[in-house]
Image: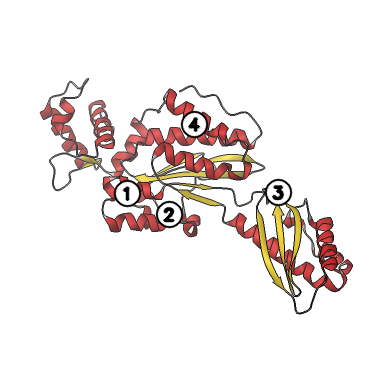
Amino acid sequence: MEMSERKRRILRAVVETYINTAEPVGSKTLAQMSGFQFSSATIRNEMADLEALGYLEQPHTSAGRIPTPLGYRFYVNELMNAYRLTVEEAERMRRLLHARIRELDKMVSEAGRMLSQMTRFPVYAMSPASRTLPTVRRFEIVPFDSRSFIVMVVTSTDEVYNKLIKLPFEHRPEDLRRLAGLLNSYFTDRSVRDISEEMILECASLAGSEGALVSLILDFTVNTIEAHADRDVFLTGTSNILNYPEYQNVEKARELMDFLTEENSEKLPEPDEDEDMKILIGPENVEKELRAASVVVVSYNMGGGQRGILGVVGPTRMNYAKVAANLATIAEGLKRFFSGGLLPPFDG
């Protein structure tokens, strides 16, 4: 059924007033709004119709009404105006992006932190699963005692991983220096995914009595780098949810906060391959822990067929237009960054 212009205006007013106040909206409130020329009785009748159609509902304790998930969906699809960033918001975003633009390995997590600061909601940020792994910059081997040593692996993103390795025999410092030299000669400046069994065997044969250590050190190197890549998920601002009246119930808040963890990253929504942004409202979410919440999530191109993900989680009473505008702006900045281009101009 086609919704009349009057009903559309009333529904928009109810949604936007409720977003701002978190209080059920009554007909008298709308009648007093600037630009509304409908009587309180007319508005009350139209709100009753909108309730019958499933767009509004009436809480037990109030004569006012609030939007249902269907009401929010109609608002997002049909009624929501694009949000234009203010000059202050745009300038803040520009400064934050430029301040962190040199830190490639931290760019995604910093974008998530910035987005949480801007929206005051929990945010998740994910790098693509197929992203290029860092290379090994150098291996260092430091003797610990006569039967053990510490191997240190320094990557191209300045991450340092180390492991204490114990031996069944005594070692000589010069043998460990030779082993480190062989590892640096064979396996630095290349992705761990490019390390072949033939290369390992060739290096081990040259290492002599320390040959067995080559496989041991490389197993540690490959597994550690790939494990950290698999965990390239960043969640921030989870406790922000406690600032909203919808989550003053401790059990409800705990259920959502316990869900927003790295272990559940595979369950967090992503846009479909053919879309840049997705908005999921309440029961549209697959995971039961999210069915009382809304998620706005965007993807951005990182080149080479890879994409990153940024998502905002909050109550269904979120300012969808503002959240979407912040997401789109940051995603565009990240896309420009990863493609080697300039950051987009801000015209807030």
Residue type at tag 4: Met
Provide the residue designation for mark 3.
Answer: 156
Nearest-to-viewer mark from 3 and 2: 3
> Which amino acid is tagged 1?
Leu
Q: Which residue is mark 4?
A: 93
Q: Is residue 246 above or below residue 227?
A: above
Would you call the spot at circle 2 few (<14 residues within 10 Å), some (14-19), or many (20 or more)? many
Q: CA distance from mark 4 to mark 3?
A: 28 Å
> Between 4 and 204, which is closer to the camera in this rendering?
204
Tell me the residue that label 1 is attached to.
Answer: 242
Q: CA distance from mark 3 to mark 2?
A: 30 Å
Residue pointed to by mark 2: 260
Q: Amino acid at mark 3?
A: Ser
Residue 66, quarter of the rendered image: top left
Question: Can residue 72 be seen?
Answer: yes
The location of residue 7, given as percent across then percent down, is: 23, 30
Are the residues at dot 4 and dot 2 in contact (C-beta closer than 8 Å)?
no
Indicate the position of residue 120 as horizontal and vertical percent values: 38, 41
Q: Residue furthest front?
A: 145
